Amino acid sequence: MRIKILFFISLVLSAARLLAQTVIPLYTGAIPNSVPNNMKEITINWDGHFGGYKSIATPTLEVYLPAAASANGSAVIICPGGGYGMESYQAEGINIANAFIKQGTAAFILKYRLPSDSIMKDKSIGPLQDAQQAIKQVRENAVNWHIEANKIGIMGFSAGGHLAASAAVHFDSAFIPNKEHTSLRPDFMVLVYPVISMTDQLTHAGSRQNLLGENIPLEKINFFSNEKNVTDKTPPAWITHSEEDKVVDVDNSILFYEALRHHHVPVEMHLYPKGNHGFVLSQPTEQWMRPLFDWMKTNGWMK
């Protein structure tokens, strides 16, 4: 009986370790590009259940670490979507993080600042600053979290996909203090029905309005149109999208795929004929993520 009780306690502790998480500040000092403000963060509930946040002025990282016995050394920074107007933190953050740690991959949910002139000097770079800081913080603390510094990816959904892709193509332009010269390049990116372009023909209007505002200079449109900024050094990508997406045109993913391919960047894309925006969220999380896990295993980021 004593052995059975000890075994049960061991299982409980292992399960608790698997789901353990900690929320930490993204910046230890002053938040760059910020102005004094009185913005109050708002929690969003859908049908009586937690859904996410809006009016985010203070960015954080929520840390999910796998059980030590299953840890494979890789990590993914997750950027929930929401049109740069809110963040779908539960469905495109917490659920995804829990799926990763079950596979032995550490996960970090980035609650990035939502662009607003009331809290930033330049709202267009605020989210990108937070994504770069997340990469920097995870990489600099890799040893503490039992992560390999060359196995850190970034993942984004919808507008969060635009943020993840922006971090991947603009890693050599630091928008944050980086006196340590820590690499801001993610080792891979995962894009789920992503907004990619800010051009009139292809963009998601709400995301562009929230991020860039009105009367946008052409150079800024081009800078944030990620399909125009791919180079041979852009990290490998895994992309999924639905051809029926009525919110974010699937051509966002297709043009980005083509840009990556022409620059000889490894990329795998899964297109589905049915399903509107957010189509994967109606499926069991680990089921739709299975091809992603296979891709990560093939490339040595997951065992």
Image (cartoon, helix red, strand yellow):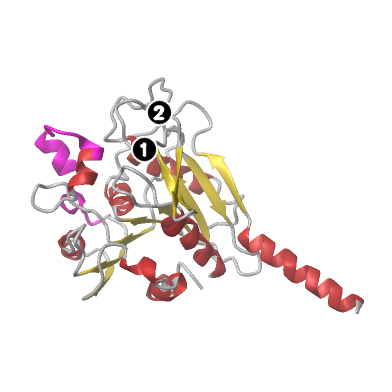
Q: State the extent of the magenta-drawn residues as a range.
A: 210-232
Residue at figure coordinates x 27%, y 50% from the top left: 169
Q: Position of residue 19 (x, y in %)?
A: 62, 60
- Dot 2 amino acid type: Pro
Q: Secondary structure at mark 1?
A: helix
Asked if residue 191 can be seen in this view, the reply is yes
Q: Position of residue 211 (x, y in %)?
A: 25, 39
Which is more toward the observer, 28 or 12? 12
> What residue does disc 2 label?
32
Q: Position of residue 181 (x, y in %)?
A: 42, 38
Magenta region includes residue 231 = yes
Indicate the quadrant where residue 152 lies.
bottom left
- Dot 1 amino acid type: Gln
Q: Secondary structure at mark 2?
A: loop
The answer to whether marks 2 and 1 mark residues whose Cβ atoms lie closer than 8 Å is yes
Residue at figure coordinates x 53%, y 48% from the top left: 62
Q: CA distance from mark 2 to mark 1?
A: 8 Å
> What residue does disc 1 label?
129
